[in-house]
Structures are given as structure tokens and as C-alpha cells.
Amino acid sequence: MNTPKEELRQLVMDLAVKRGEFILASGRKSSYYIDARLVTLHPQGAHLVGRVILQELSRAGLLSELDAVAGMTLGADPMVTAVAMESRQFEGAKPVFAAIVRKETKDHGTGRKVEGPISAGMKVAVLEDTSTTGGSALKAAGALKEMDCEVGVIVSLIDRLEGARENIEKAGFKFMSVFTIKELGL
């Protein structure tokens, strides 16, 4: 029987990996693109993403103190929701809140850059669907730090192995990935 991580890997390979010529958010060119939203917005994919990220955080000893998960809109939106929902049923976890970091501060209503039930002092894991340089995750972490949240770790579903880990660790954050492109055979 496959583990949730093995099932998630297969779903990523079946649904998310596209071949061709692509420009990534980092501006780099690539011969493949991983559209992780096709997995994170899939009913089984969302369940597996939530479960596997919680398992990875638990294995790393980071889950017990975690208050919330957050990430940059749009890629992290379904991920933070999946993790928050799965945390209600995950053994050894307290329920965690989900938050979404806007690309720009809202200029109306509450004027928030970070949306969700999150406040100063919370310990947060930043989630990202696919990491190339880590720029989006670092922007999210910066917005959370401005709110006086503690960013305990940045977790990427897929690390493209193009500098994200190095950039994130250089900025002083822990980094984890569920998969690397090598583990996906790319």
C-alpha cells in the first residue's frame, strides 16, 4: 500500500508536470513547469498535501508549537487551507489557523497585507507550492515578521533546486521541501 507521500508524488507527476518552454515567476526559463495548483485544488490532492505537510512538520519536530500556516496568494491559498483542515484530525497536532499574504497591502477595508485569524506572537510555517529562488516565500515571511509573528520554517511542496534553500537559509529561516525535482525524476 502506498504512503500518503507516495500517493501525492504520483498525483504531482500525473497532474502537475508540464513539458515545453516556460518562463517561471523568478524570470528564469525552463523546459518544464509544475502547475501545483492542479494538485492542491484537486480533492484528493488537497487532502494529501495537508496530510503530508503535517507529517513532514511532525517528523521535523516543528508541529507541536505551530499556531498557523501562511503563504503568498495564489499558490499557497489552497495549501494553507488544506493544512488547517487536516490539522483538526491529525494525531499529535492542535488545530492550526490559515492565513494568506497579499502581494500588496489592501488599500480599502481593514488595509491588511495578511488575511486570516493571525496575530502577533504566533508561530507560523510559511508554505509555498513550488520554489525556485524562494523570493515569494521570503516576501510572505517578511510580511509575517512585520506583524511580529515568528516564522518557524518555510515549507515548499516542490523545490526546483535553483537556489531557494540557500536564499531562505541565508535569510535566517529553516527550509523544508516535501519533494525536490530530483525526487520527481525531473
Image: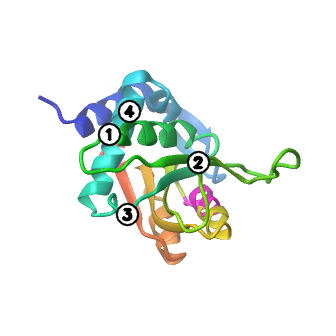
In this orientation, which residue lies closer to the viewer: 169 or 132?
169
Query: Quarter-wise, where is residue 13 in the image?
Result: top left
Residue type of the residue flagged with mark 2: Ala
User: What label does residue 65 carry, if any?
Assistant: 3
Residue found at x 38% / y 33%: 12
Q: In what element is the residue under mark 1?
A: helix
Q: CA distance from mark 3 to mark 2?
A: 17 Å
Which amino acid, mark 4? Val
Residue interval drawn in magenta: 133-140
Residue where numbered disc 4 is placed: 12
Q: Say which amino acid is labelled 1.
A: Arg
Report if residue 138 lies within the magenta region.
yes
* Label whose residue precedes the other's in the sequence (1 or 2): 1
| Camera-nearest residue between 92 and 125 | 92
Query: Which residue bears the numbered disc 2?
Result: 99
Query: Which residue bears the numbered disc 1?
Result: 51
Going by the numbered disc 3, the residue's amino acid type is Glu
Query: Which residue appears at 43% of the width and 55% of the height?
Result: 155
Q: Position of residue 105 (x, y in %)?
A: 80, 54
**Lower position in the chain sequence, tag 4 or tag 3:** 4
Please name which of the two marks, 3 or 1, marks the residue nearer to the observer: 3
Say whether marks 3 and 1 touch (CB < 8 Å).
no
In magenta stretch: residue 10: no
Q: Quadrant of the C terminus?
A: top left
Compare marks 4 and 2 and give the one earlier in the sequence.
4
Residue 23 location, x and y as percent? 64, 43
Q: Position of residue 171 (x, y in %)?
A: 54, 75
The extreme top residue here reads 43
In this rendering, the answer to whether 21 lies above or below 155 is above
Prevailing secondary structure of the magenta residues? helix
How far is mark 3 from mark 1, CA to CA?
17 Å
Name the quadrant containing residue 152. Answer: bottom left
